[in-house]
């Protein structure tokens, strides 16, 4: 794999307030460095996608930004050290959708989404009218309203993912972190998710997503390209340097082309073969 030549962050990012920052963040798992001295700034009110090959550290970085992974270094959230945020207030301001999340199959869809409102509820109090309205909005947005009385165990994988997404939306957080949110979604609902994220950003929300679907990730405002626990490049998805970095990190498997105003990651068919994947 060739390291991209241009690894500087996108200068345009400096024009935006910062939602999340990492300063010298590192993490180890089983004696192996899974994140190595990460420094980054995630702009507020923008969609930032994270891409890279398997084992690049994408999910680990997202967990570090969410405070779900023990790290060295420092993570800041909305200008304050993440560790200094009161737990409940942080849960109101930051929503999390993990990869392959589990939830009790006997819970109703309504109750699963209502879990997203827990940070807004006083201790031992029931849901408020505002909580109920937020759940209804989230279920309607993800087209899951018709299933509200069904249990999670009665749903398909794609339906289940839409319910978990609705739970994230119900939090109504300023910042949303999503790890592989397109899991089990068919193409129409992947497009729905894309439209949803663009609408959230238009409202001033911040979205950070880990995606394997590079063509979808290229719709984001910003992109982080990772490999071997490091950030190789950060920049606007429309920048040629960002696209070169994506091609380099997946070399020789994909190349990026423009089609009708959209960027697409297409396979280099001629490069496939056992000899090209020996390492």
Image (spheres, grey):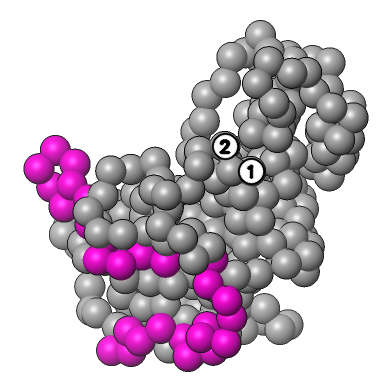
Q: In the structure shown, which secondary structural element does the residue marked by tag 1 occupy?
A: helix
Can residue 269 be seen in this snapshot?
no
Q: Nearer the viewer, residue 171 or 105?
A: 171
Can residue 94 be seen in this snapshot?
yes
On screen, residue 43 above or below 26: below
Q: CA distance from mark 2 to mark 1?
A: 6 Å
On screen, residue 170 above or below 265: above
- Residue 63 x, y percent position in the rendering: 40, 47
What is the span of residues highlighted in magenta in the rendered image?
Answer: 5-34
Residue placed farthest to the top in the image?
106
* Residue at (70, 35) in percent of width and height: 120
**In which quadrant will I find the C terminus?**
bottom left
Quarter of the rendering containing residue 73? bottom left
- Residue 68 x, y percent position in the rendering: 39, 41
Quarter of the rendering containing residue 40? bottom left
**In which quadrant will I find the N terminus?**
bottom left
Q: In the structure shown, which secondary structural element does the residue marked by tag 2 occupy?
A: helix
Q: Nearer the viewer, residue 61 or 233?
A: 61
Quarter of the rendering containing residue 149? top right
Tag 1: Cα neighbours inside 10 Å, few (<14), some, or many (≥20)?
some
- Residue 235 x, y percent position in the rendering: 47, 81
Task: Verify whether residue 23 appears in magenta.
Answer: yes
* Residue at (16, 52) in percent of width and height: 33
Tag 2: Cα neighbours inside 10 Å, few (<14), some, or many (≥20)?
few
The answer to the question of whether label 2 and label 1 lie on touching residues, with beta carbons closer than 8 A, is yes
* Residue at (49, 55) in percent of width and height: 210
* Residue at (28, 43) in percent of width and height: 70
Task: Verify whether residue 186 appears in magenta.
Answer: no
Q: Which mark is residue 143?
A: none
Q: Which residue is mark 2?
A: 88
Q: Which residue is mark 1?
A: 92
- Residue 144 x, y percent position in the rendering: 82, 33
């Amino acid at each position: 794999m060739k390291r991209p030549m241009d690894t500087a962050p996108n200068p345009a990012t400096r024009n935006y307030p910062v939602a999340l920052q990492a300063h010298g963040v590192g993490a180890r798992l089983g004696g192996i460095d899974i994140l190595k001295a990460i420094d980054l700034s995630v702009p507020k009110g923008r969609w930032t996608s994270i891409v890279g090959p398997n084992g690049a550290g994408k999910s680990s970085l997202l967990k570090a930004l969410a405070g779900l992974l023990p790290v060295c270094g420092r993570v800041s959230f909305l200008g304050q050290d993440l560790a200094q945020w009161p737990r409940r207030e942080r849960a109101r301001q930051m929503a999390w959708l993990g990869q392959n999340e589990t939830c009790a199959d006997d819970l109703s869809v309504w109750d699963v989404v209502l879990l997203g409102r827990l940070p807004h509820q006083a201790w031992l109090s029931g849901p408020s009218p505002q909580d109920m309205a937020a759940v209804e909005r989230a279920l309607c947005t993800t087209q899951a309203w018709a299933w509200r009385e069904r249990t999670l165990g009665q749903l398909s994988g794609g339906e289940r993912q839409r319910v978990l997404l609705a739970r994230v939306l119900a939090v109504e957080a300023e910042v949303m972190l999503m790890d592989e949110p397109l899991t089990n979604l068919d193409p129409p609902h992947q497009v729905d998710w894309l439209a949803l994220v663009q609408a959230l950003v238009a409202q001033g929300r911040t979205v950070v997503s880990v995606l394997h679907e590079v063509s979808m990730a290229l719709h984001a405002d910003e992109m982080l390209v990772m490999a071997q626990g490091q950030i190789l490049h950060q920049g606007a998805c429309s920048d040629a340097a960002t696209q070169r970095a994506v091609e380099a990190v997946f070399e020789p498997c994909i190349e990026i082309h423009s089609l009708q105003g959209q960027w697409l990651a297409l396979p280099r068919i001629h490069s496939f073969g056992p000899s090209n994947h020996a390492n």
